[in-house]
Amino acid sequence: MRFINLLVVIICIVLFLSGFIFEKGAALYWNTASLIFVLTGTIGAAFLSYSFSRIKCATIVLINSYFRTLPSESSIVMALLDFSLKSRYEGLLSMENTIEEAQTPFLRNAMMMLVDGRTSEEVKDLMNIEMTFFRQRREQSERVFRAMAITAPAFGLIGSVIGLMGMLAGIGDVGVIIRTIPIALTATLYGILFNNFFFTPMAEKIHGRTQQELLLQKLIMSGAIAISNAQNPYVLEKKLGSFLTPSVRVEIEIKFKEIRKQYMKVQWENKAQDQR
C-alpha cells in the first residue's frame, strides 16, 4: 500500500470514529452482542461456502495486494527491450545468463521459453493458458470477500431481529427493553459497516490488483512474441510504447537509444578485436 493511501485511510478512520464520540459518546454505539452476531455469522458462512485452503489463499492474495508492490509498466518495457537488443546482437542463448534478473515470474518464464527455442505460437498458447488460470484463481479469491460483503448486512439484520424479539418479549419490563434496543439498532449498523468499509474494498483491491497484473502479463506476452519473431527492436519499442502514457514513452525512447548505443559499441569493439 502506498504511503499516501495509508495516510488517507488513517485520517478517514480517525474522523469517522470521532463522529461517534461527538454524538453523545462512543459507548452508545458499542454493543458486543451485535458484533458477535455479525462477525461469527459472516465468518461461519464463509467457511460453509469455501474450503479453508481457499480462504487462506484469498487472505494471502489480499495481504500481497496491499503490501507487495508490482514493477511499473515502464520497467517491464525496458527489460523487454533490453532482452530484444541482447537477442539481436548476441543471440537468444545469451539471454540465459540474464533470466534470473527478470522482475516477475511471468517474465522469467517467458524468457525461458524463448531460450528453449519455443515458437511464437507456442509462447502465445502457453502464456494465454497461464493468464487464463491466473485470472480464474484471482476471481475465486475475490469472490470470497464479495460473499462476505453480501452476508455481513444480512447477519446485521438477523441481529436486529433478535434484538426486536427480545424487546417484544420484555414488554412491560423496562430493563429488558433497554438491554435489547441497542442490539436491534447496532447490529444493522455493524453489518453495513463491515460490508462497505472492509469486505467490499478488500474485494475491489484484489480486482484492481488482478487487472494491473494482467496488463503486465499482456505486455510481457506481446514483447516475448515479438522477440521470438525476431522483430526489429525499433518496431518493438513503438509497439510496447502503446501500453504507456505519452510522457513515459519519451523517457523510454531516450533510454532505448542509450542501451542500443551500448550494445552497438560492444559489438564494434568485438569486431575490431577479431580483425586484429
Image (cartoon, rainbow, N blue to C red):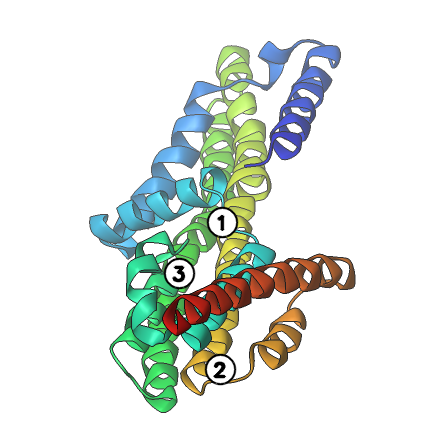
Around disc 1, counting alpha carbons within 10 Å, would you say few (fewer than 14), some (14 to 19), or many (20 or more)?
some
The secondary element bearing badge 3 is classed as helix
In the figure, residue 111 lies in which quadrant?
A: bottom left
Residue 175 versus residue 136 in the image, above or below = above
Amino acid on which disc 3 is placed: Arg
Q: Left or right? Give the position of 108 relative to 38.
A: left
Which residue is pictured at 29% across the width and 84% down the height? 118
| SS label for mark 2 | helix
Q: Residues within 10 Å of mark 3 (few under 14, many from 20)?
A: some
Quarter of the C terminus within the rendering: bottom left
Residue designated by label 1: 70
Residue placed most toward the observer, 272 or 178: 272
Q: Is residue 231 left or right of residue 24?
A: left
Q: Nearer the viewer, residue 212 or 53?
A: 212
What distance separates the C-alpha of mark 3 from that of mark 2? 28 Å
Q: Position of residue 213 (x, y in %)?
A: 48, 60
Can you tell which of label 3 and label 2 is closer to the viewer?
2
The answer to which quarter of the image holds residue 196 is top right
Q: 26 above or below 263?
A: above
- Whether label 3 touches label 2, CB < 8 Å: no
Q: How many other residues sit within 10 Å of disc 2, few (<14), some (14-19) or many (≥20)?
A: many
Amino acid under disc 1: Leu
Please report contact status of discs 1 and 2: CB closer than 8 Å, yes or no.
Answer: no
Q: Which residue is mark 3?
A: 138
